[in-house]
Image: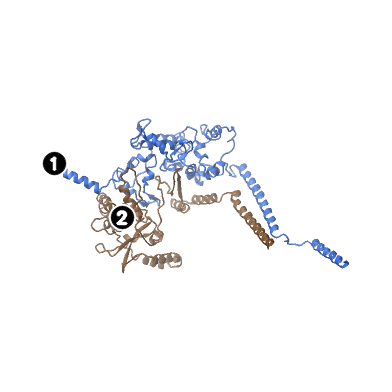
Chain colours: A blue, B brown
Amino acid sequence: MRNILSVYFIFCLLTVTGILFFPPEVYAVDELNCLQCHKHRGLSRIDEDGNFRLFYINQELYESGPHRHNKCKDCHTDIERIPHDPAKKVNCTQECHIVEPSGQRKFSHKSVAKTLTQSAHSKIDKNGLPKEHQEDYPDCKSCHDQPLYRPFSAFKGDKIPGVSKRAMGRCKSCHTGGDFAEDFYDHVTTRLHKTRFPMETIEVCAKCHEDEEMRKRHELDDVITSYKETFHGKLLTLGSERMPDCLDCHIVAGENSHLIESKTEPTSAVHENNVSTTCRASECHEKAGPMLAGFQTHVTYDRKKYPLQFYMLVFFKALMAFVLYFFLVLIFLELMRRLFPTFAFFKEKKREDYHEYVKLIKDSNRNKH
Amino acid sequence: MVKLLKKIIFKLYVIFLMAFTVWYGYFMYPLVFGFEGKEKAEASLMEIGQAHTEEERLFVNLISSQGKTQKTDLGYRLIEQPYIEGRFHHIGFEIQSDNVSICVHCHGNTPHDKSREVRSFLNMHAFYTACETCHIRGEKDNPNLSFRWYDKETGEISNNPLELVEIEESYSHSDGKNYYPTYGDYGAKIAPGLMKEGKFSFLKSHKDKSFVDRYLAEKDKLTAEQKSQMEKVIHKQVNKQPVECNFCHQEEKSYIPFAELGYPPRRVQELIRTSAVGMIEKYKEFYIPNFLSPGKEKK
């Protein structure tokens, strides 16, 4: 009996000690207590190649996206203990512990990777051979940072950013357990509109497509600059979220968003036979005629490649400059005259004679009187 | 009189319109002939294109992307954070830079890279601990040094950071919600100093900073020998053997008085008894016996 009491006492003592000195810094996904170190904003170093490596994890933002139920080790599988060696590159196609609800299988991004191999961004060609300049082709992290939810509500028709408390109240009346309702709401509403602000999508594509050397290697046009010069691009720059970004035009409606194909592919959304259908998407130019996009959408002013466009640009720029600055100079000179009404570089001789003549007349009249 | 006044107003109006016309011509120039920003971006990329080696490419990339930030618009919240190429996880905010430290001026915020096992931890400390805290040592058993927080912007003694209170509050919430205190971005750093006649003064003063600033400004005029001399003088106080981890992370008599510096009781316990010490012990056990003495490590 004494032994049992002793064991019980030691158990209680250990429990109390554990609670007091090993406080549960409760993080939903932090079973290994990774945040003990990684919560510090300054945890960083410069690696051997001179790159800045920051190991900080912003827990609040981590919990604001679809990965919030993933444990660190679900992705960083090579980490077995703390402290650990430098982590290896994450393989996004590996299965994680989350069960995909529609198929009741472990979740994986394998299908996305498979789709990517069919796209213009694939590292392999149609024959399964590696393409030239492998390093230019993107992997998951080239385009994706940690995804974050962009929930919205539309309770009375108007789209309002953020979670609707009213809707959440209705969900929670049945789905009371855990944070299922929040997850579902965030996930679905985020997918109902753009998961990224359009300008952010443009910036992602620009990472590669603005690189002049890369464009030269693959004989690509400067599509980012040309997009920004379009009406779509200009309105986007002014903050409109309704304007199309790269994905809206380059992906066939209903297709996997990773299936971006070359415009030469017959199934591409921007193939000459399909581009007008793409423009006529229900959210865009629904009633537009087939010729709406019958022009070169990304006009590139390359003198050698597109001489007609180049000289057209030169002509219109010259015309615009001439008209604008001609009238500005005219207005400026007119204002000068208002400021100095009698100013003249050269006084006209005739006018001087005229003044003398008037003076003579006046004098003679005075003498007569 | 009224006529004269009218005339003056009219002339001023005409001058304003003339100025507006000139400004408008200047304003329209980039719109007619192209955007200045685009030309700059192209020039920057051209420069990168001409870089031949990886090192050259990185150098030019660093120069051209200075101060680059990344915006993520969630609709209900805009996140503006520093851009780090290849980074997956969001950072969320920029850490306040130290405009005061003479060391950071040349060595930057992440200078530690000798010891592979602890370099990131040492850099982590450099965001809230002044370099001289570890690199200018007081005696362990009889430390003459006192410690205070200094404001990263002004260099003056600052109050204990409020973020430390937030950390304490984050422990006490029991409503099931998560609270996210910030660790390491306090707008201030712990630095050592001396008490003279009841008045505290930091070891590194504004005068030292002026001295180094002047040296950097005049550096090109000095001979190679003079440069070496100056660098020796500047680093004279730096101790070859820095303060070791267990000087502070130990229960008996911590080198830095955490409680006095505003660390809440539970955080102090973590630092001197549980999590931090536990981590150090694990490192000591699994990795390197001399982890606690990073300066002694040869590799």
| Residue at far left of view | A1
Where residue B15 appears, x then y in whole percent?
Answer: 65, 58
Which corner quadrant holds the N terminus of chain A? top left
Label of residue B263 in the image: 2
* Residue indicated by mark 1: A4
Mark 1, secondary structure of its residue: helix
The amino acid at mark 1 is Ile
Where residue B174 appears, x then y in whole percent?
Answer: 30, 44
Which corner quadrant holds the C terminus of chain A? bottom right
Q: Residues within 10 Å of mark 1 (few under 14, many from 20)?
A: few
Q: Nearer the viewer, residue A36 or B86?
A: A36
**Chain containing mark 2:** B
Mark 2, secondary structure of its residue: loop
| Residue at far bottom of view | B197
User: Are labels 1 and 2 assigned to the same chain?
Assistant: no
- Decide if residue A219 is on the left or right side of residue A58: right
The amino acid at mark 2 is Tyr
Q: CA distance from mark 1 to mark 2?
A: 41 Å
- Decide if residue A158 is on the left or right side of residue A311: left
Q: What residue is shown at x 52% (from left), y 50% (from top)?
A: B41
- Decide if residue A11 is on the left or right side of residue B68: left
